[in-house]
Amino acid sequence: MQNKQSNSIRTVVATGIGAAVIFVLMKFVAIPTGIPNTQVNVAIGFLALLGAIFGPVAAGLAVFIGHALNDFVTYGSPWWTWVIVDGLIGVAFGLAKNHLKIENGVLGKAKLIWFNIYQIIVNFIGWVLLAPTGDIIIYHEPANKVYIQGVTTWIVDSISVAVIGTILLVLYAKTRTKRGSLTKER
Amino acid sequence: MQHQLLIGYADRHTFLNRLSGSTKLLCFVGLSIIGMMTYDTRYLIGIMLFSLVIFHFSKIKYREISFVVSVIIGFSVLNLVMVYVFAPHYGVSIYGTEHLLLGNNQHYFNLTTEQLFYEFNLLLKYTFAVPLALIFLMTTNPSEFAASLNKIGISYRVSYSVAIALRYIPDVQSDYRTISLAQQARGFEISKKAKFMTRVRGGIQILLPLIFSSLDRIEIISQAMELRRFGKGKHRSWYMAQKFRANDYLALIIVALLILLGGLLFHVNGGRFWNPFK
């Protein structure tokens, strides 16, 4: 078992490397949807795994840093409302850690279904409720434009987590030793 | 994919390089926040000119940034078109008057001066921070960046995460390329010639090794840092940290005055919009 000290170091490192991976994924593996500034985002599938392993702090900060850096070098300045919403979604994915208990190596169907319902709700709150509202208040953009961007992002991100996130979670769980898999020899 | 993605830092021996990273960070964040809030066209144009002048002094060559600039222009144009398609009367509802240029009142797509003016403001808002961001990126040493985050009050653990991210982005990028080439050598087609589903499957074949090798890397680095007693002390000193000099204070004062001016304009305009149609 790891003690508290080494856990906090792991969080720092997971945040840094996670941000680097998210940055690279956002940069290279982005498939446009046709609506400006919304893409099929592979990075958010990875975020689900990062949250399930390292918890809310690492996942939230990693996506915040990764997204802000990516905006910085592609668009010149970060689009803060979306960066913050992405960070919150990372935190929410991280909160699923205690329920999924992926380190135990068992990830049944029930947990996967629960996680997918959870992520769809989280994405809905983030992309359909928070992000467009922030855009309207802070950037004063027309409502129907930002809502259509929000809804598109919600749909593609949910699909991305449902497919890529689920695959990653299952594969990662397989690499862990199952809890209680050892039996005492008689 | 061959062009350089992370536009690079280089010591260009200008006064901007000699400013401390914390100063540049504070100035950039301050100006971008006030620019995000305000819709005063005069102010936005002023900041834009100010940053272009500074940009001129930074001795950054156009060919170093031409790719980024074209991406930004594409992004802004797409957004402006989309705003027009979804809300061609938004300017009218903001400024309260209607000066028709094309079409008539009955049509959904007519063109008003207000709408043009609103979209011009949007364009300014999308682009005014770009010269500042480029200056910041290209004159600040990445290692100093983490030190300056810590200096302006962000905990050193978070600053160190940012430092790790900046340090490992090139590594993850080259891992990605290596894995991608290896998988292509094994016969996974991921170029545009392949069908969509084949491409997706090829993409996942790259993703899995990349992610699992990164998870290994997290373990290795955190063990190494634990061996070197990271996180034992309350504070941390930074090799790249710079002391504030007279120029830093001068720059901070100028930017603070600019921000104050922006705040004052809210008051003068009675809101975030400057309305020339009244």
Image (spheres, coloured by chain):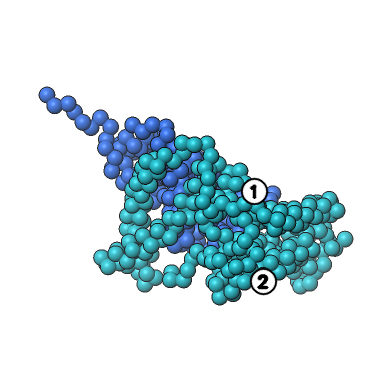
Chain colours: A blue, B cyan
Label 2 chain ID: B
Left or right of B54? Residue B8 is left
Which type of secondary structure does the marked residue at label 2 adopt? helix
Residue displayed at 37% across by 69% down: B191
Residue B56 badge: 2
Quick check: A121 above or below A138?
Answer: above
**Is residue B116 at all visible to an observer of this figure?**
yes
Residue A5 badge: none
Label 1 chain ID: A
- Residue A21 quadrant: bottom left
Quick check: B8 above or below A7?
Answer: below
Left or right of A164? Residue B24 is right
Q: CA distance from mark 2 to mark 1?
A: 34 Å
Name the kind of residue labelled 1 in the image. Answer: Gly
Left or right of B98? Residue B146 is left
Quarter of the figure that contains the N terminus of chain B: bottom left
- Residue A176 quadrant: top left
Quarter of the figure that contains the C terminus of chain B: bottom right
Residue displayed at 29% across by 64% down: B182
Disc 1: CA contacts within 10 A as few (<14), some (14-19) or many (>=20): some
Image location (x, y in percent) of residue B237: 53, 45
**Is residue A67 at all visible to an observer of this figure?**
no
Image location (x, y in percent) of residue B102: 76, 73
Name the kind of residue labelled 2 in the image. Answer: His
Residue matched to label 1: A134
Residue displayed at 67% across by 71% down: B56
